[in-house]
Amino acid sequence: MALPKRRHSKSRTNKRRTHQKLSSPNVTLCPQCSEPKLPHRVCLNCGMYKGKTVLEVKEV
């Protein structure tokens, strides 16, 4: 099995790892209540999805 003759520098290692990072989730606003929510998911604030009530939200 082949082994490297010299160690890779820190900058070279960091250059390789530049794409290994977390991306922030896409957040959209609910059209009914204008609360931030994830796309293609039920709004947990009002319980609406595509203009229809899917969840019954309890008032606290």
Image (cartoon, rainbow, N blue to C red):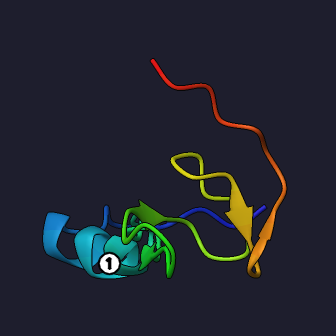
How many numbered discs, if any? Answer: 1
Front residue of 9/3: it is 9
Q: Which residue is drawn at 37% across and 68% down?
A: 24
Q: Observer-nearest residue: 6 or 28?
A: 28
Look at 38% across and 79% down and name the residue there. 16
Query: Vertically, is 28 above or below 8?
Result: below
Looking at the rendered image, the quarter that the C terminus falls into is top left
Q: Which residue lies furthest to the front in this view?
A: 59
Q: In this view, does 38 lie to the left or right of 28?
A: right
In-image side of 55 versus 31 (left or right): right
Q: Quadrant of residue 57?
A: top right
Name the residue located 31 percent from the left edge and 61 percent from the top edge.
Answer: 7
The kind of secondary structure element at disc 1 is helix
Q: x%, y% of residue 31?
A: 50, 82
Q: Dot 1 surroundings within 10 Å: few (below 14), some, or many (20 or more)?
A: few
Whether residue 51 is visible to the viewer of this picture, yes or no, is yes
Q: Where is residue 37 in the image (x, y as percent from the top left)?
A: 49, 63
Query: Quick check: 14 left or right of 59?
Result: left
Q: Which residue lies furthest to the top in this view?
A: 60
Report if residue 41 is visible in the image: no
Q: Quadrant of the N terminus?
A: bottom right
Is 19 situated left or right of 32 in this image?
A: left
**What residue is shown with label 1?**
18
Residue 56 against residue 27 in the figure, above or below: above
Residue 41 percent coordinates (x, y): 72, 64
x, y (%) of residue 3? Answer: 59, 62
The amino acid type of the residue labelled 1 equals Thr
Q: In this view, does 34 lie above or below 44?
A: below
